[in-house]
Amino acid sequence: MIKRAALLTFLVILSLLTALSAEEYETGWIEGQLMIKDRGAMSDGMVVFFDARSGPPPSLDRYFRIPDEVGVLDAEGKFRVPLMPGKYYMGAIKRISGEKAGPPLDGDYFSISQDKEGKPLAYVIEKGKDLNIGTISDAVPFKRTIAEGVTGISGIILDMTSNPVEGAIVFAYITETMTGLPPFTSYKTGKDGKYFIGFDKGGKYYLRVRDIYGGGPPIPGAIMGAYGETSATAVAVKTGEITKGIDIKVVRHLEMGPKGQHTGIGVDKNIQEEQKKKTKEEVEKTSGKD
């Protein structure tokens, strides 16, 4: 009986190891070293990868695409990251600003791997193979700029009393369900609540608003909202133009996690009640003035 139990345990462990080995073999690996131009290693920074199948090449001044994979740079700026087979663009960031996630801010060291013509360079990852890109020394202090002729949407993020909201982030989706990793994101809004979100081309985009770049359920006080009065509404954008005046109203989430059935705009019943309450208060204030 003991021998049989030991044999079964061995077989279970062997099957697990075989599964893990098979999973690891499904990926390829990319490695190298990233440096700040004329200033040494991008120590303790991040290397980011953009899957060519899920979006356009990254851009410095037209739009900010959310990376599909993220790796860590060691004290010497070295990395080794597993990736599923495919074509990827690569960038790197070492934050000086203190912001933990999202687009680089002024002063952060940032780079996008480019070819000799200045176009984002694509790396091909093959199953079970290593790709060593050597040492790249092109990271420089980031300075936010917006190129001429950009494609995008702009407006103001407002609370239910029509005051501008600071610290809000706009995410753009190409599907009405607005699920999964959003292809594009904006910077956080300032005190004026103004936002701009750019795209690689025109089309119809659905907008959701949060105050964090990570996913997960909202915490108490978190900003939540989406463009559309009662359901998700697409914003039409023409290539080379900015669709302006797309203001979005948001509310503060009251309790941890969603408590009711989500509506088309991603706002649960708890938030809808808060919206009604605030609107009612505004109407009463206005009536009192008359």
Image: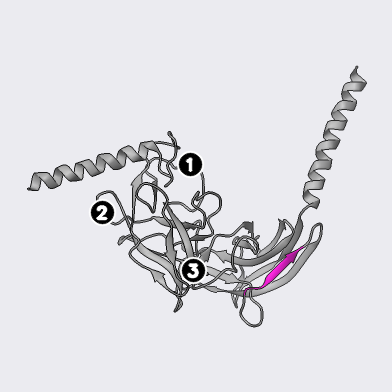
| Mark 3 surroundings: few (<14), some (14-19) or many (≥20) residues within 10 A | some
Which three-letter amino acid code belongs to the residue tagged 1? Pro
- Cα separation, mark 2 vs mark 1, equals 25 Å
Give the percent coordinates (x, y) of residue 100.
50, 56
35 left or right of 158 in image: right
Give the percent coordinates (x, y) of residue 217.
48, 41
Per the image, label 1 sits on a secondary structure element best described as: loop
Q: Which residues are magenta?
A: 120-125
| Mark 2 surroundings: few (<14), some (14-19) or many (≥20) residues within 10 A | few
Q: Where residue 217 is drawn, which disc sits there? A: 1
Which three-letter amino acid code belongs to the residue tagged 3? Gly
Q: Main secondary structure of the magenta part?
A: strand
Q: Residue lying furthest bottom in this view?
A: 117
Viewer-proximal residue, 66 or 178? 178
33 left or right of 103 in image: right
Give the percent coordinates (x, y) of residue 210.
42, 51
